[in-house]
Image (tube, helix red, strand yellow):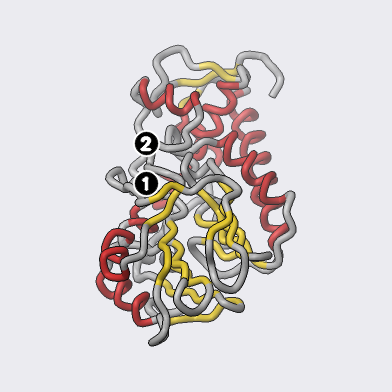
Amino acid sequence: MQAGVVEWVARDVRRVLAPNPSVMTGPGTNSYLLGQGAGVVLVDPGPDDPSHVAALLAALGPAEAVGAIIVTHPHRDHSAAARRLSALTGAPVLAFGTAEAGRSPLMQHLAEAGLQGGGEGVDAGFRPDRLIADDEVLPCPGASLRVIHTPGHMGSHVCLGFGDILLSGDHAMGWASSLISPPDGDMRAYRTSLALLMAQDWRLMLPGHGAPVAAVQARLRSLQDHRTQREAEILAALRTGPATAAGLTRQIYRDTDPALLGAAERNVLAHLVDLWDRNVVAWPQTPQADSVFHLTGATA
């Protein structure tokens, strides 16, 4: 897939790849146009890159217009172009909320206690024109479009059900696992949201990064199993003695690209926060990314 080129990935679904490849975004951010005609829905307008904005507008037919712009979550690689495209098309920007919306009480507590995020590109100034709610059905030509609130990668993250097609944002992808970085990311919420998606029958998954996924249930299950395995590895490492998230990352991610170790450490921290909330591990001081964790003796 080449950036800026329109690709029909399913009936009534066009994809335009943004020119922002990286170790975190893979080939770049996928923007999707759903339906055809006067009420096309744009999902994840992507980075505020002039060439990408132009490519999205050029993807529309002469009799087409954007009826709504939906942002799955306010990370800048998904949301930054929303305001510019809204001004150019007149379409309102819809989202579950701001970057802080949807946090669990635990994550809100950690944020207020000073736990810092890991620099994941949060769009702190993002403000939608209208809030959308879990299980809300939105107007869209071609098929029903249902909102599925899926906190985990962010508290305000949503997936979308376009008929039997799952637009999964950054919650589930085929090429990599998702970054879960407290206090914006929440491992327990992420796994609960995965289970919610697995309970539904999907024909195709269209992620925020990477190629479409046909074997949706198998991929969702593998992501859930991956988190279960990672938790077991963390607990096994802690049985050898107390450690920080950074120390555990060095023990567990031995063959990982060094450019990805920062993200891996945030995922380890997310597991540790979940284990702490379940009283399986403890930390002796105000929670910070460099806190030392140790086992409590409770069963996971």
Pick out the residue farthest to the bottom: 62
Q: Can residue 205 be seen in this view?
A: yes
| Secondary structure of the residue carrying numbered label 1 | loop
Quarter of the rendering containing residue 119: top left
x%, y% of residue 65? Answer: 40, 76
Residue located 71% across and 20% down the image: 299
Say few, some or many: other residues with alpha carbon within 10 Å of mark 2 (under 14 / 14 to 19 / 20 or more). some
x%, y% of residue 289? Answer: 40, 29
Count of number-bearing discs:
2
Q: Disc 2 designates what residue?
A: 117
- Alpha carbon of mark 2 to alpha carbon of mark 1: how far? 7 Å
Residue located 46% across and 71% down the image: 39
Residue 133, compared with residue 248, is above or below; it is below
In this view, the residue in front, 85 or 245, is 85
Query: Left or right: where does residue 176 sit relative to residue 16?
Result: right
Residue 234, compared with residue 51, is above or below; it is above
Q: What residue type is labelled 2?
A: Gly
Q: Which mark is residue 120?
A: 1
Residue located 37% across and 36% down the image: 117
Q: Which amino acid does label 1 sit on?
A: Glu
